[in-house]
Image (tube, helix red, strand yellow):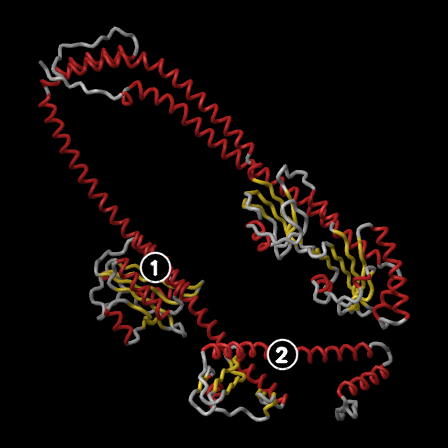
Amino acid sequence: MPAQNNQNISRFSSIRARLILSFVLIVFIPMAIVSTVLAITATQNVQAQLTTQLQTVANYKRTAINELLSGLQTQLETSILGEAIDQNINTLLQAPQDSIESQTASLYLQNHFKKFIERSGEFQTFFVMNAEGQVLFSTDAAEGGKNYKNEVFFQGSLFGPFTHLSSFTQTIIVSLPIQDENNQTTGFVAGKASTAALNKIMQNTDGLGQTGKTYLVSLGRVLLTTLPDAQIGDSLISQGIVTALESQSSGSDSYEDFRGTAVFGVYTWIPAIRVILIAEQEQAEASEPIYFLLAINIGITLAAIFIAIIASLRVTRSIATPIDNLAEVATRIADGQLDLEANAGRSDEIGMLAFAFNNMTNQLRQTLESLELRVQERTTDLEQRTKDLESRSGELAEANTQVRRRILQLEAISRVARSITSIQNLQELLPLITRVISEQFGFYHAGVFLTDATNEYAVLSAANSEGGQRMLSRNHRLKIGQNSIVGYVTATGKPHIVLDTEKDNLFSKNPDLPETRAEMALPLRIGDKIIGAIDVQSTDPGAFSEQDAEALSTLADQVSIAIRNSQLFESTQQSLAEINTIYRQSLKETWAKTVSEQGNSGYQFGVFGNRPLREELKTEGAKQAIAKGELIILQGNSEPELAAPIKLRGQTIGVINVRAPEGHIWKQNEINVLQAIAERVAVSAENARLFEETTRRAERERAVSTITTKIRSTNDPEEMLAIAISEIKNALNAREIRVKEPETQTEPSTNS
């Protein structure tokens, strides 16, 4: 009885199970892809729509804020129009504070501004300050006598009309400078307005949804408008606030707000009051349409999968049973029962399969008879294919060799490019380039020639081979235009490639490079100027390919750029060194002149007070500190010393010398403190000197301006001259000034 070869088929590996799984996957995969694409598209659309909506709200509110601020400034300008109000403000600024004129002007301004406050409905207080920030008049008695010199709005008003939003007083301060006929600022008029209108603008939630909000934040991250979850004056921190304040521009992003809630945010910079306007909406609210769409897609997908399972059960039942019967017949035939036939009574594809199976069984009988002949034919064919594969393998190996060579060439170009960016010294760069060319391209010699200053010779500047090193040691050079390959290339600017040196007229044998059988030289150029050449030599005739020429041409261009960059770098370094030397000399001379003008060489501080030093300090520590320009520590002497040089940009301009009682040991913290003091003294002294110099220059300019103004007050030349002499005499404290008319030389007449 034949052996049974039937195998137990797993329920999940049967055709029925795989057909059902295929139906489910055919439905599920497209639905999943469609759902994913819809979800991503919906998310992007929602985010884009929300960003546009928030930007629209932010732009609208920024425009409203700018209109509010512009209106306040216009009202303030209107409040001081008129000759009477202008005259009373000037009287208040110029008359003594307790004078009758000042009190009269204050009373007038009090009545005027109170009426204006009643009419405007926005301003709460008006006040007038002098040029030093002192309040001379205010409609609010509590403001009287205050000094706002250090306040932001006062500092900003020095340069023109200024608006400031104060989180501390919750007011909008608008200030205007008052100038005299010489355009000199004599005082300021300022008004404080309530932030109620500003809060009303920011609390409007139109277009923001249920969770949206807008608010203003100062440069110090201080909240300036009302929020449900924060108070005015609170310090807020979030990624959106930090990004907005750092860029001081407009933008949008998704992040966690100051409460830690995920939001979509839009921010815009308001330069008029130097604050950031932020509009935000919670991501949870914005994502609700996306979640709803996902729920619908999931429901549709599950319904489609259920329908696919029901349909697949009905279809697979009509397919799997006939196939099982056919499989049983095939198994019995495989066991040796070649006389069996399958049931081919169906008219569908399974019936055709059974008919074909029966034909196959008949052919199998015939095939067994001619099997040996076919095996021999297949063996012959296999041998032929093996030969073809071996031939193709050789071609592939050759192609791989070319690819590897190209990779080495590109690697050489890359290494040279990296070296150019990191090495500025040609003495280091050019030898590296020759080594890279030799290693990556496999040439036994590579050299770089550079033209000399007279453009007469091409001088070998770098080489990798032993012969090249000998040539460098004797300063090898070739005349440009001479009968040599390098001379030809540097003269014409054209590359020259010799595949066989025995057949080239320009090639000349070099005893240092006797093995050369092929040579290639490429020009180095900067613009239209030839600055040298790259020369490579090989021991193999025909060693250079078109790819080698292209790669070396690219290298030649890079080397030319490197040479130009190195020349520019060396020139820049030399100029910088000269500037530093001149600056240090100028600094030394300036400080020597300053010390000479003051008449003191320094100051001495002790337990009995301080006194100026008329003579130079001559202690050992001070001498060494000035000479060496470094901290000097002397211990074990009768008076231990600690001397720190006062250095300004590398130039020693003085020394701090500290002496302690005998036996004192200097501690590290004392040394650190003295070094820190010396650094700060250097900066402070230089600032003081610059300030004094600037002050003197300003006084001279002011005196010249005053004299010029007085001279221009008349059109009479004699009176102008008299005014000029009088003012110059007073300015220079001179006893006598003489104006001498230049002598006119008369040319001697000649008699014709």
Mark 2, Cα crowd under 10 Å, few <14 / some 14-19 / many 20+, is: few
For marks 1 and 2, the one nearer the N-term is: 1
Q: Which mark is residue 464?
A: none
Residue contact between numbered discs 1 and 2, judged by CB atoms under 8 Å: no
Quarter holding the C terminus is bottom right
Q: Measured from the top left, where is residue 570 in percent x and y?
A: 44, 72
Left or right: 687 as drawn, with respect to 435: right
Quarter holding the N terminus is top left
Element on which disc 2 rests? helix
Amino acid marked by disc 2 = Ala
Residue drawn where x is 55% and y is 76% of the image: 680
Q: Measured from the top left, where is residue 739 in percent x and y?
A: 79, 89
Reading the image, the residue beneath label 1 is: 415
Residues 217 and 357: in front is 217
Mark 1, Cα crowd under 10 Å, few <14 / some 14-19 / many 20+, is: some
Reading the image, the residue beneath label 2 is: 688
Residues 576 and 165: in front is 165
Q: Is residue 534 visible?
A: yes
- Mark 1–mark 2 Cα distance, whole angstroms, equals 53 Å
Residues 726 and 659: in front is 659
Amino acid marked by disc 1 = Arg
Q: Measured from the top left, where is residue 543 in percent x and y?
A: 24, 56
Residues 574 and 284: in front is 284
Q: Measured from the top left, where is residue 727 in percent x and y?
A: 80, 84
